[in-house]
Image (cartoon, helix red, strand yellow):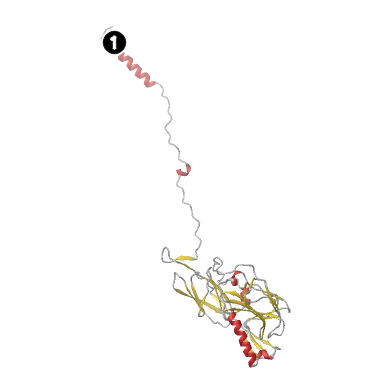
Amino acid sequence: MNRSTKLPMALSALLMLAACAANAPRAQTSPERKPSRPAAMQSKQAPTQQPPAKPSRETSIGGGGAIPARRTLLPQSVAQGSLVIGGTHPAAIVEYAGRTVRVAPSGRFAFGVGRDEQGPIVVRVTQPATGMIEHRIEVTPRDWPVEKIDGVPPNTVNPPPEIAERIEREQAMVAAARKRDDAREDYAERFFIWPVQGRISGRFGNQRVYNGTPKSPHSGMDIAAAQGTAIKAPAAGIVSFAAPDLYLTGGTVVLDHGAGISSNFLHLSRIDVKVGDRVAQGQIVGAVGATGRATGPHLHWGMNWFDTRIDPLLVLERVCHVGPNAPNIEGIACPTGTATIKPEK
């Protein structure tokens, strides 16, 4: 075979091999897969909803670092003879009736509304972050019936000069005890309780007529009780006055509850405390009697804010002096403790 014949045959063999390779079955390969993403990453997460912020009683005024202002809590109206408890910024200056009212570290403050106050009364509050703001409170008038009391010793109704001087001297000592202005909040730590249980035989503010002679309105509440009945402290306090035989009031104890608020217990047959004693709520301070200007055994329980007389019955009945729609923020406006026990009518 010559060279020219070998070339066509080799070319034919190459073409046959190529055809066979084209018709051969191909091995199947899996397509390349990208690693799957976690389900949490496949869909965009919804933003987590934060709980609504609680309303704050403080609002910053003047930008970062400014002293916050705090909402002042006061009632819209009060009755004559009320004890009013409010709340504000602890560094605020509170003014009422020509007096700067003590503000506790909690922001609580208190003052009394007199029997004859007509209103509206004005309470001025100056906080560090604000100017002075006037708060006006309406005063609800009350009816004051006339009480006629006969059979009291004549010398206690129209005393002779020497007795009148003694009475004036004794009352001045009691008035001095009421000037105390301690930084205590015994008046608001718990609800007041009844010092004795019994019928109310004389009400605060009623006009008194002794043996036919008109005298000053009744300064407290009389509770009828048997001679020797134990008298309990209606709230904690410190004894600021104690005397066994004052001419008009007989056995007399003054218990200071802080911030100018005090209780006085009159006509006692026995006194179980002394000046300076720290007294807990419910502790016995003395016993019911009929000493001084009295026609029978009973407890006269009076209350004061300095020289302003307030009604103990309203103090017993109060729940909160900021009104039903105002929040009780951290106990500023309302005291804590158990409910009071109502007396027998």
Q: Residue furthest bottom?
A: 160
The x and y percentages for residue 86 are 54, 72
Quadrant of image for the N terminus: top left
Q: Amino acid at mark 1?
A: Lys
Residue lying at 47% horizontally and 44% vertically, measured from the top left = 40
Q: How many marks?
A: 1
Q: Report the residue marked by disc 1.
A: 6
The x and y percentages for residue 225 are 72, 78
Query: In the figure, residue 21 lies in which quadrant?
Result: top left
Quadrant of image for the C terminus: bottom right
Query: In the figure, residue 336 lies in which quadrant?
Result: bottom right
Q: Work out whether residue 155 or residue 18 is closer to the camera in this orientation and state it.
A: 155
Q: Residue furthest top?
A: 1
Residue lying at 64% horizontally and 92% vertically, measured from the top left = 162
Query: In the figure, residue 12 lies in which quadrant?
Result: top left
Instruction: Give the vertical position of 335 relative to 166 (above or below).
Output: above
Q: Work out whether residue 94 or residue 207 is closer to the camera in this orientation and state it.
A: 94
Q: Residues within 10 Å of mark 1 (few under 14, many from 20)?
A: few
The x and y percentages for residue 207 are 63, 86
In the displayed structure image, the side of residue 313 where residue 7 appears, left or right: left
Residue lying at 63% horizontally and 88% vertically, measured from the top left = 166
Instruction: Give the vertical position of 110 relative to 217 (above or below).
Output: above
Q: Secondary structure at mark 1?
A: helix
Q: Work out whether residue 343 or residue 276 is closer to the camera in this orientation and state it.
A: 276
In the displayed structure image, the side of residue 74 where residue 13 appears, left or right: left
The x and y percentages for residue 69 are 46, 68
